[in-house]
Amino acid sequence: MSGTTKTTEVYLTGLRNQHAVETQAIGTIQNQLPRMTAYPDLHAQMQADHERSTQQAARLDSLLARHGSKASLVKETVTGTVATVAGFAHSFASDEVLKDVLAAVGFKAYEIGSYKVLITLAQAAGANEDVSVLEQSMKEEQEMGDWLGSHLPSFVHTYLGQQAA
């Protein structure tokens, strides 16, 4: 296997992995949304993030198809199961929304890093036409991560107000 072929295979594996990550994000958000209704701004942003994750997964499908590949059914099944469990992990904690937001901030950092790696892999594999698609998804993740981080104090204050009521 040539270096270029190996690099392309590593890149395609990365695309499949990121597709599984987006699938996990979609499932996790679906499970968390019902518990965020007391936080209208957060609820609206998470709904929008769910839609973005769905679009990002579709973009990744398109990139995989462009290269004659597709998402991994095994990875999708495993990450779907993980998303279901993760979505309920904090559901019995009194501060579940705060824990969910902290987990989302961490997950956004992971996704941003993953897209940076994919951009580098795409360039190394000569798939330069893929870079702008990956950069778009990375920018969306950065915007959501920034929004979550900047609103953490307001979530804490809302939570404290609900606890005092």
Image: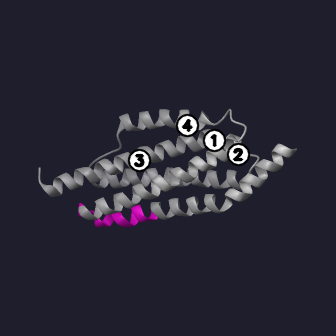
92, 43: nearer the viewer: 92
**What residue sits right under mark 3 in the picture?**
19
What kind of residue is marked 3?
Answer: His
Task: Residue type at mark 4: give it.
Answer: Ala
C-alpha separation, residue under disc 3 versus residue under disc 2: 25 Å
Q: Amino acid at mark 1?
A: Gln
Q: What label does residue 132 carry, if any?
A: none
Q: CA distance from mark 1 to mark 3?
A: 20 Å
Q: CA distance from mark 2 to mark 4?
A: 15 Å
- The residue drawn where x is 56% and y is 41% is 28
Q: Residues within 10 Å of mark 2 (few under 14, many from 20)?
A: some
Q: Which residue is tagged 4?
A: 86
Q: Main secondary structure of the magenta part?
A: helix
Marked residue nearer the N-terminal end (3 or 2): 3
Q: How would you rate the neighbour count of disc 3 (Cα within 10 Å): few for under 14, some for 14-19, many for 20 or more?
A: many
Residue 36's disc number: 2
Q: Earlier in the sequence, mark 3 or mark 4?
A: 3
- Earlier along the polypeptide chain: callout 1 or callout 3? 3
